[in-house]
Image: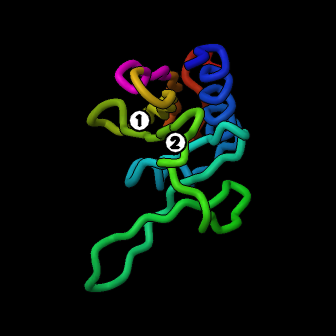
Amino acid sequence: MDKKLAAQVAERKLKDIVSGKNRERIMNLLEESEHGFITKEGVEYVSETIKEEGEKDRYILKKSSGADANSWNPDYGYEYQFEVNAFYEDRTKKQIRVCVSVDGDGWSSFSPLIIDEILNSHDLSIVDGGL
């Protein structure tokens, strides 16, 4: 895994989440993490949960642009996979930590690159000198 490229992917995803102050997306991350892949060609696919009443949850991969990804499977090979999640930093729920982890195919999955940012939960401002 090229750590420099992985860091660029992680920083871009984190900046997209925290600089946009997208409260709904961050609140959703507190409930369920986002997971996806970036192919060797640079195309990004995001896992989406399909919930059907009385059925087991299913997952499909969609291009981050929104198009269905019917013909792509992670078994075909990918450059990076990523996970984005958020959690409250303490019991008072005054701060939210947003984390992005990126790793490559193979052994690098045992040592992912992780970056994070702490936000004030009331206004989603970055705590003390972040990005």
Above or below: residue 65 compared with residue 67: above
Q: Which of 123 and 114 is in front in this view?
A: 114
Q: Is residue 99 left or right of residue 21?
A: left
Look at the image and say whether residue 24 sits in the magenta stretch. no
* CB atoms of marks 2 and 1 within 8 Å: yes
Above or below: residue 56 compared with residue 106: below
Q: What residue type is labelled 2?
A: His
Residue beneath the point at 48% across and 31% down: 105
Q: Position of residue 77 (x, y in %)?
A: 54, 41
Residue bounds of the magenta highlight: 108-114
Q: Which of 127 and 31 is in front in this view?
A: 31
Above or below: residue 6 compared with residue 24: above
Q: Position of residue 7 (x, y in %)?
A: 61, 20
Residue beneath the point at 52% across and 37% down: 81
| Crowding at mark 1 (Cα within 10 Å: few <14, some 14-19, many 20+) | few
Q: Mark 1 points at which residue?
A: 94
Residue beneath the point at 44% across and 31% down: 97
Q: Which amino acid does label 1 sit on?
A: Lys
Q: Which of 61 and 97 is in front in this view?
A: 61
> Quick one: label 2 or label 1, which is nearer the N terminus?
1
Q: Mark 2 points at which residue?
A: 122
Quadrant of the drawing holding the C terminus: top right
